[in-house]
Image (cartoon, rainbow, N blue to C red):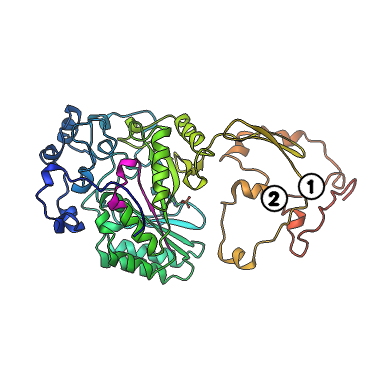
Amino acid sequence: MSNLKFAPGRRAPFFKDVADEKWFDWRWQMSHRLNTLGELADVLELTESEKKALGAKSLFRVDVTPYFASLIDPKDPYDPIRAQVIPTDREMVPFQSMMEDSLAEDRHSPVPGLVHRYPDRVLMLVTTQCASYCRYCTRSRIVGDPTQTFSRKEFEAQIDYLERTPQVRDVLLSGGDPLTLAPKLFEEIISRLRAIPHIEIVRIGSRVPVFLPMRVTDELCDMLGKYHPIWMNIHVNHPNEITEELAQACDKLSRAGVPLGNQSVLLAGVNDSVHIQRKLVQDLVRMRVRPYYLYQCDLVEGSGHFRTSVAKGIEIIEGLRGHTSGYAVPTYIIDGPGGGGKIPVMPNYLISMAPGKAVLRNYEGYITTYTEPDDYNPHAVAPLEAQIEQRPEPGQSGVHGLLQGQEMFIKPANFDDVHNRGGGMHRLRADETKWKPLGIGSAPDLIEGESNAPPAQLPSGEA
Ligand SMILES: *Cc1c(COP(=O)(O)O)cnc(C)c1O
């Protein structure tokens, strides 16, 4: 073992007589999850607001593993773990811009359960079940529904889509939580993906190591080790979730060759403080878990009271970058409402520019100038033939496409119609030879065989 030193998880007094063989058995934990007012009241001193929520109909599903519930201070109504899994009546308060599917995932689904938002990777939802349910779940519209479990027919349709979509090189298994699936089924999913030649990496998004670290068994790690490259992102929001049990689960996964990242959500009253975030990311790095993303809370039903200002996220990154190891600094992300995808946001470090100079500031407020070379000749390399043929990215070249000269504009739908006031009719009839557009096309130095050539001269006068 490594020389990790984290406090072992507690065991709530209510569970003190449970034998170790049961407590450390993930199946026991799953089948003894707490979900009713009565069961939760055995372990915690419930507030009026929590009792009201737990008594409400049409509440997003509640389930908490005994292990995770035991990490809560039963007397503290503001406990940061408690807020993540125990509902309050604030969950039922609607807010402006609230949406059911704020990331427009359903619109991006070519087949049920597959979200193809980005050119080369897909999100594959393989179950609606989790080990415990986060109150701010971005997918609460589908997650937790016990009638919507794994469907063989949908799985075959997902595999079929992936087989005929060669630009997909990265499949992200999520849900729900893939690690709650029956071990045989989970392996079947991974092995079927591995059998598709163009799928280079498989990623697992799971909070099971946090809710149910005992699920990370030697058998699971051996199984994953057969299908590399496998990557995994876990979901830790607060340092109190980091126990010796979690550290051991992460250690096992790392030793099995699975690189670990962490995706956390910025939550009011849970982790909206630089001091908590600094402790969190440093503890993660000690466990060899790389903080990957810090998400702004989505505009999803039930999560209104968890939302923070964007300024809070910027302040947190300001308090991390430079102040602690670069490995410990996640990228702060707003997932664009309406389906914009992940958008990174951060403090401004580039203060100003002029030709030949960039003025920058560091985390201390020191301001410096980077002088650019005046003879820089970009080494532009044309894309490989195979990339052009196999990995088309229709309509997704984006701002990079503007820089490459593939397009000259990105316009809102109907832009041309809205701005057409018939001006073309008054134009002077120019001689055809007088003005000739050069076209947009690819930049001259991108043409094959001419890479690294000196910049082409613009034709002067007639072309
Ligand atoms: C987050 C997400 C991904 C993965 O994004 P990365 O930035 O590559 O981690 C892929 N597809 C969808 C729909 C996502 O929401």
Using the image, tell me which numbered label, if any, was put on residue 394.
Answer: none
Q: Residues within 10 Å of mark 1 (few under 14, many from 20)?
A: few
Q: Where's residue 396, x and y in %? A: 56, 51
Task: Evaluate whether residue 296 shows in this view.
Answer: no
Residue at which label 1 appears: 437
Q: Where's residue 283, x and y in %? A: 39, 45
Q: Quadrant of residue 14?
A: top left
User: Residue at point 77% right, 38% down?
Assistant: 355
- 330 drawn magenta: no
**Which region shows up in magenta?**
230-246
Q: Where's residue 311, x and y in %? A: 47, 29
Element under disc 2 = loop
Name the outermost residue toward the front.
3
Q: Is mark 1 within 8 Å of ligand 1?
A: no
- 237 drawn magenta: yes
**Of the two numbered discs 1 and 2 in the rendering, the one whose residue sits closer to the viewer:** 2
Name the outermost residue toward the right.
461
Front residue of 167 and 253 = 253
Q: Are marks 1 and 2 in contact (CB under 8 Å)?
A: no
What is the three-letter code of the residue carrying label 1?
Answer: Pro
The numbered mark, 1 or 2, whose residue comes first in the sequence reads 2
On the rendered structure, is 363 left or right of 244? Answer: right
On the rendered structure, is 375 left or right of 387? Answer: right
User: Residue at point 77% right, 33% down?
Assistant: 426
Measure how far apart labels 1 and 2 are at the Cα level: 14 Å
Residue at which label 2 appears: 405
Q: Where's residue 29, x and y in %? A: 18, 53
What is the three-letter code of the residue carrying label 2?
Answer: Gly
**Quadrant in the picture for the N terminus:** bottom left
User: Residue at point 21% right, 43% down?
Assistant: 69
On the rendered structure, is 62 left or right of 112? Answer: left
Task: Evaluate whether residue 97 shows in this view.
Answer: yes
